[in-house]
Image (cartoon, grey):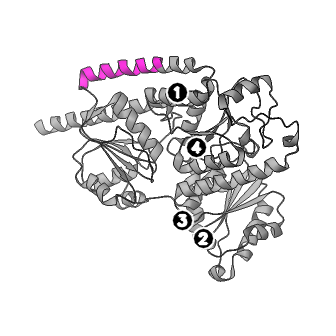
């Protein structure tokens, strides 16, 4: 790639709220996203989703409001966009997402959409960049859908049948035992406390999205581990669940929050609206990290087959230790003078603990959180927040003396421009200098093996480069 192209590709610093909302809605099968804004917003959001979902081009459209729409409103352009959708597509539902400027106009989007008379439901949200970046947009979309869950519960006929006094949220463990005796138990909102196999405790997974680095693979791994442990996954809003499944969110025994920046507010809203308990657990990284993560869940909602996961973890860990011992005998310990981890909070915190606590040694580990967070992982020697500690972040790169960089193409590009030595391993987006063609996750047990392999191979490649350089200097 030519130098100007590389620099341009790696100067994208953040993703706007409109893209976050679009990514959430696009994860729902049968959905169609109508961007009420200019082509730039449409192309950016659509391409961001298309990177993992090739069908995005056929599920996005743009109203392209005229210049005077900011004065007189977007009704004309919005009706034309809805008419285009009606004549060319057959979505199960349409989500209208307003960009920054349109959000300021104050159009009655719901009223305009009603006049379009589409044969499917239409929902609208304001989620331009002034609302924040990707997490805020995702959060807005999730909260909007939870509002629909509340409406659905109020109007669902079955929700009014056989109400009893069982409240699954007063005590999660007790609710599981009670549900084993009465599979049709409902809470005070009319939601069944357990559906399907009543012997399995059920979970909602909040804060997952396939648009993260290895997002689809991580979702699959998290589900695999939880199901192996004996849990039933009730719904994953934003992570691929169908609309009907999302409407049954209150049926779960517990809400798991995997990324606070995406779903903590939603978990609190579900607790307030439906009395549902929630547990913020973060993302599971590393072998021991995954087991500790699962133990936290087990303490609140006991699993039925935790031992199966433990046995798998022990087997994989033994293999990793054996491979590591072999490599150390040839190349020395997995040591890095410095380690920089730059990623969203849940990823960066979990990976920091796994890397330093299970696999590698270092003299200095610095975390650059890409979003504000209260997480303070003990493995980090220094923690910096994007948008708050930018000057200190700049110093990290300018004073870099070499080591392992776990981040995205942004960090790699910056160090290349500064002509700094570094060992690269991608764990976050954007990722322009690595192709992903396998289904290996980064989190969980399978992800631990993958990340362990990536880090070791990155170090070994650096060692080989050093050997080649020395040989060249002696010729």
Can you give x and y, in whole percent of width and height, for residue 151 in the image? 79, 52
Distance Cα–Cα, label 2 vs label 3:
13 Å
Q: Give the secondary structure at mark 2.
A: loop
Q: Which residue is mark 2?
A: 38
Distance Cα–Cα, label 1 vs label 2:
48 Å
Residue 208 - label: 4
Q: Residue at x 70, y 49 (%)?
A: 273
Q: Who is closer to the viewer here, 194 or 387?
A: 194
Q: Give the secondary structure at mark 1.
A: helix
On screen, 272 above or below 297?
A: below
Q: Give the secondary structure at mark 4.
A: loop
Visible residue check, residue 78: yes
> Which stretch did the figure color magenta?
314-331
Q: Are marks 2 and 4 in contact (CB under 8 Å)?
A: no
Residue 129 - label: 3
Q: Which residue is mark 1?
A: 295
Q: Earlier in the sequence, mark 4 or mark 3?
A: 3
Can you give x and y, in whole percent of width and height, for residue 116 in the image? 81, 68
Q: Residues within 10 Å of mark 4 (few under 14, many from 20)?
A: many
The extreme left residue here reads 474
Distance Cα–Cα, label 1 vs label 3:
38 Å
């Amino acid at each position: 790639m030519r130098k100007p192209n590389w620099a341009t590709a790696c100067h994208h610093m953040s993703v706007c709220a409109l893209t976050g909302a679009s990514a959430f809605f696009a994860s729902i099968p049968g959905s169609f996203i109508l961007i009420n804004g200019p082509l730039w917003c449409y192309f950016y959001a659509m391409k961001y989703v298309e990177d993992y979902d090739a069908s995005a081009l056929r599920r996005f459209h743009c109203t392209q409001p005229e210049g005077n729409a900011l004065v007189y409103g977007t009704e004309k352009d919005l009706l034309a966009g809805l008419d285009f959708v009606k004549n060319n597509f057959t979505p199960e539902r349409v989500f209208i997402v307003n960009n920054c400027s349109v959000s300021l106009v104050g159009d009655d989007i719901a009223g305009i959409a009603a006049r379009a008379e589409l044969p499917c439901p239409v929902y609208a949200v304001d989620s331009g960049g002034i609302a924040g970046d990707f997490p805020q947009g995702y959060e807005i979309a999730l909260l909007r859908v939870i509002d629909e869950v509340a409406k659905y519960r109020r109007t669902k006929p079955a929700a009014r049948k056989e109400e009893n006094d069982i409240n699954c949220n007063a005590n999660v463990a007790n609710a599981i035992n009670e549900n084993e005796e009465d599979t049709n138990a409902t809470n005070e909102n009319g939601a069944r406390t357990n559906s399907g196999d009543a012997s399995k405790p059920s979970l909602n997974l909040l804060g997952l999205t396939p648009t993260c680095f290895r997002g689809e693979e991580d979702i699959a791994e998290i589900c695999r581990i939880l199901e192996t442990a004996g849990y039933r996954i009730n719904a994953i809003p934003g992570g691929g669940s169908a609309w009907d499944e999302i409407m049954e969110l209150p049926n779960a025994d517990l809400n798991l929050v995997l990324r606070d920046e995406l779903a903590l507010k939603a978990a609190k809203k579900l607790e307030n609206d439906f009395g549902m308990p929630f547990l913020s657990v973060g993302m599971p990284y590393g072998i021991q990290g995954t087991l500790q993560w699962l133990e936290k869940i087990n303490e609140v909602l006991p699993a039925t087959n935790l031992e199966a996961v433990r046995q798998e973890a022990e087997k994989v860990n033994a293999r990793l230790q054996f491979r590591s011992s072999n490599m150390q005998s040839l190349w020395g310990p997995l040591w890095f003078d410095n380690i920089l981890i730059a990623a969203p909070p849940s990823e960066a915190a979990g990976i920091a603990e796994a890397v330093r606590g299970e696999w590698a040694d270092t003299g200095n580990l610095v975390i650059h959180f890409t979003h504000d967070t209260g997480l303070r992982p003990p493995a980090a020697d220094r923690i910096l927040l994007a948008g708050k500690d930018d000057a200190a972040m700049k110093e990290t790169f300018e004073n870099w003396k070499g080591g392992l960089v776990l981040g995205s193409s942004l960090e790699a590009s910056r160090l290349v421009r500064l002509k700094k030595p570094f060992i690269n391993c991608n764990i976050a987006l954007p990722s322009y200098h690595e192709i992903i063609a396998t289904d290996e996750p980064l989190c969980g047990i399978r992800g631990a093996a993958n990340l362990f392999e990536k880090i070791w191979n990155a170090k070994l490649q650096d060692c080989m480069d050093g050997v080649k350089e020395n040989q060249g200097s002696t010729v």
